[in-house]
């Protein structure tokens, strides 16, 4: 699959930063917001490969969608938006924080299948890939950690094309993809895990998660 166009739903710290990195890598980026007029400065900063508009237009535009919302906003997406996401590769960055998201975050933290399963249930039909949830946005911007190594980005998904697309975006954004496994393996890099918010390199992530050196499958 040739990916050229990225639709971003939630153009805040993570969505905004990711759009800048992807535009620099040559992708066309469509930022969206409930209030597209507020994105003028971001588009100016991110440059000529970017534009901004409605959530519906961003979803229609993207070969791949980056969904980067507070978790509480995901079930609030209207039926039309959820329908539009069906069949799309959706890279979800969300994390559950009860102090911000309320009860839904408490429920998500109890989910045995991790955030991947939880979000997939909220968006049936979307081809969910978990990625970019482990990295603080200011570190994402730098792409390297304090040791000067590329930051590793753990990925999980059941959709092979989606995983491949997400790995490609991670790499082209200047970071190092680590495919952890199927969607349920996203729990290995959810909030509170050994690799969460550490800006660890891919090598360190593989060691901490006991992945085989090739990084494509979990060790038994
Ligand atoms: N900040 C980080 O360093 C970081 C790191 C990794 C993962 N994450 C996770 O990634 C997701 C996005 O984080 P972020 O820091 O980029 O968030 P953010 O800066 O607050 O941006 C989120 C965007 O979501 C949109 N939105 C849509 N519906 C919303 C609603 N009901 N309430 C609030 N905002 C709504 C807002 O855009 P409009 O108001 O323009 O529509 C807002 O710009 C979160 O789940 C977060 O936990 C964050």
Image: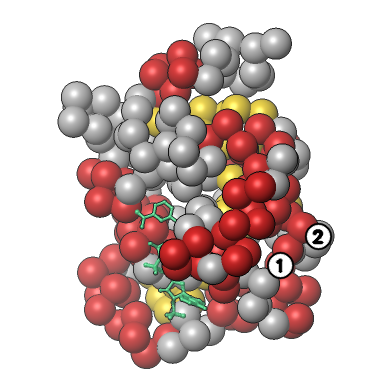
> Where does the N terminus fall, quadrant-wise?
top right
The answer, for residue 172, to whether it is visible in the render is no
Asked whether the viewer can see residue 131, the reply is yes
* Viewer-proximal residue among 76 and 192: 192
Q: At which x and y percent is residue 126?
A: 74, 59
69 displayed left or right of 198: right
Q: CA distance from mark 1 to mark 2?
A: 7 Å
Total numbered labels: 2
Q: Residue at x 53, y 20 (%)?
A: 209
Q: Is residue 68 above or below residue 77?
A: above
Near-viewer residue (140 or 62): 140
Left or right, 147 with reference to 135? left
Query: Where is mark 1, residue-wise?
Result: 85
The secondary element bearing badge 2 is classed as loop
Question: Split into 4 quadrants, where in the image is the C terminus?
Answer: top right
Q: Secondary structure at mark 1?
A: helix
Residue for badge 2: 125
In percent of the image, x 33 and y 34: which residue is there? 199
Say which quarter of the image contains residue 51.
bottom left
Outermost residue on the right side: it is 125
Q: Nearer the viewer, residue 176 or 112?
A: 112
Find out whether the residues at labels 1 and 2 contact each other: C-beta distance under 8 Å. yes
Q: Position of residue 90 (x, y in %)?
A: 63, 56
Compared to residue 115, the image places residue 123 above or below, namely below
Classify residue 35 as left or right of residue 137: right
User: Ligand 1: does it lie within 8 Å of the C-beta at label 1?
Assistant: no
- Counting from the top left corner in percent of width and height, residue 125 is at 81, 60
Residue 134: percent from left, percent from top = 43, 42
Q: Is the residue marked by circle 1 packed among few (<14), some (14-19), or many (20+) residues within 10 Å?
A: many
């Amino acid at each position: 699959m040739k990916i050229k166009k990225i639709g971003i739903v939630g153009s805040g710290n993570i969505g905004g930063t990711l759009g800048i990195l992807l535009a620099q890598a040559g992708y066309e980026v469509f930022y969206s917001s409930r209030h597209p007029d507020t994105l003028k400065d971001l588009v100016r900063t991110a440059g000529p490969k970017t534009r901004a508009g409605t959530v519906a237009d961003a979803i229609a535009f993207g070969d791949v969608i980056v969904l980067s919302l507070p978790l509480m906003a995901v079930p609030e997406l209207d039926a039309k938006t959820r329908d539009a996401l069906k069949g799309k590769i959706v890279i979800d960055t969300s994390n559950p924080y009860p102090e911000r998201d309320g009860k839904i975050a408490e429920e998500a933290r109890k989910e045995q299948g991790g955030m991947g399963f939880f979000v997939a249930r909220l968006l049936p039909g979307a081809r969910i890939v978990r990625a970019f949830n482990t990295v603080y946005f200011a570190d994402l911007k730098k792409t390297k950690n304090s040791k000067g190594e590329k930051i590793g980005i753990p990925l999980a998904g059941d959709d092979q094309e989606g995983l491949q697309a997400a790995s490609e975006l991670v790499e082209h954004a200047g970071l190092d993809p680590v495919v952890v496994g199927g969607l349920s393996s996203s729990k290995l890099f959810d909030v509170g895990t050994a690799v969460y918010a550490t800006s660890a390199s891919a090598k360190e992530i593989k060691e901490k998660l006991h992945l085989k050196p090739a990084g494509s499958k979990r060790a038994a």
